[in-house]
Image (tube, rainbow, N blue to C red):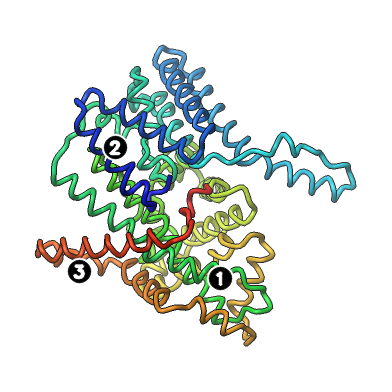
Amino acid sequence: MLFGTPIFLFLFLPLVLGIYYLLPKKFRNFFLLLASLFFYAWGEQKLVVLIIFSTVVDYIAGIIIDKGFRKTGLYLSVIFNISMLLYFKYAGFAFNNINKLLEILNVQSINLDSLLYVVLPIGISFYTFQTMSYTIDVYRGNVKANYNLIDFACYVTLFPQLIAGPIIKYKEVSFQLKDRLFSSAQFVDGIQRFVFGLAKKMIIANNCAFLADAIFLLPNSELNIFTAWLGVIAFTIQVYFDFSGYSDMAIGLGKMFGFDFQENFNYPYVARSIQEFWRRWHISLSSWFKDYVYIPLGGSRLSEGRTYLNLIIVFFITGLWHGAEWTYVIWGLTHGVFMLVEKAFLSKFLSKHKVFSHMYMILVLLISFPIFRCKSLVDAWSYIGKMFSLDNNTNLEYISFYFTTEVKLALLFGVFFSMPIYLRFEKKLLLNYTLQKCFLIGVFLISIIYVSISTYNPFIYFRF
């Protein structure tokens, strides 16, 4: 079930909210658990068993740790969750690469098609990281083990952020699971946040996707420098508003149910370095890797060489987390290499040249995103080559069909709303209550029009 569908907006959400607030507080977590499992099963059907099994395993692991068998409980959780990811997400990738290596060595390949034909469960990269954060923090003594299975299962399956984040660490919501504050102001704020997130997705991201998909589907022979840059700019805006739009909707829904989730984006495209970009982009993922991978590896406490190695390891895993393809791995490593260069010497220069530093960061993003978007490294390299080619071969009629007025407006809105200058506009809106509500209603109505006419267009990060 997608947030931007009529069945969610006009049936599931109003029904769940209505029942939720009619119930006594002591039954609300149980009801949220049932609603979340139904939400997940709507699209995943039998795979809902997987998340239930994962919840039970990590619940038991937390208790085992609390009972004194600390390493046993931790190993149970980490090995189980990593094994799930390896099988469902990476087994096919691993054996495909093994078979390619065997072909090069003229050795008979391994046929495991029947074993490896598995469906990737939506959100598995998110909820496995959430549950591991719980057991690791129990092991470290940062939180107490939760002996209430209903509360813990509610945390794992909470439908607003279940399938595409933000990644919520247990220590961030442990008290909210037991005692949440409910206020009309928070509920209204949640509605506003959800509506703006919906608008980001339906009005900006989907229109930019219309153009980006068309250009990236063009044969390399029909690309030129103009269309190549136009396509990657459209995708850059699409991926940000698609994912930040979902995060806004998740945060807004959380507020409607009394939860306060952490921010996941903080205007990443205004960053002046790749280091700053990752402090602003997908904050919950960056924070997770910092707390549970980078710091345990030694962080920056050891030698300079070890710090660089730790960064490369983190960005290798970051790329792999996004998908079981070499394109994602190389994309992650590309950002890791720029991080190393900045740490080694470039950051001092960037801090003194604000305009140049911002142009540098945007250029790195625009050059690296084709690696993220293309299906193969060969396609990505060819696309990047066209970005710097002087060829003048393109199908203008084809491009003009997709470069509509709506798309142009979406690109302009995307550039405008990706910068904090929007905050000044927002503050003026807040000073005028009537204007604020009219604006909110107008944005919602336009979004609903797009919801009613749009074809199936899932969120980009569902695949991860």
Judged from this view, the residue extending furthest toward the right is 106
**Residue 74 as seen in the image, left or right of residue 221:** left
In x, y percent, where is residue 81?
53, 31
Q: How many marks?
A: 3
User: Residue 445 vs residue 381: left or right?
Assistant: left
Q: Would you say the residues marked 2 and 3 are in contact, meaning their CB atoms lie under 8 Å apart?
A: no
Q: Position of residue 64 (x, y in %)?
A: 44, 15
Q: For the residue labelled by badge 3, is the local secondary structure a helix, a strand or a loop?
A: helix
In the rendered image, residue 209, in percent from the top left (x then y), is placed at: 48, 66
Mark 1 in CB contact with mark 3 (< 8 angstroms): no
Give the residue type at disc 1: Ala
Q: Residue at left 20%, top 69%?
A: 425
Distance between mark 2 and mark 3 Cα atoms = 33 Å
- Which residue is pictured at 40% across the width and 42% down the height? 167
Neighbours of disc 3 within 10 Å: few (<14), some (14-19), many (20+): few
Residue beneath disc 2: 16
Mark linked to residue 214: 1
> Does 188 sit above or below residue 370?
above
**In the rendered image, is residue 301 in sight?**
no
Q: Is residue 387 above or below residue 346?
A: below
Residue 425's tag is: 3
Q: Earlier in the sequence, mark 2 or mark 3?
A: 2
Query: Considering depth in this image, is 71 or 183 the residue closer to the camera?
Result: 183
Looking at the rendered structure, the kind of residue marked 3 is: Phe
Query: In the image, what residue type sits under mark 2?
Result: Val
In the image, 212 versus 306, the foreground residue is 212
Residue 452 falls left or right of residue 329: left
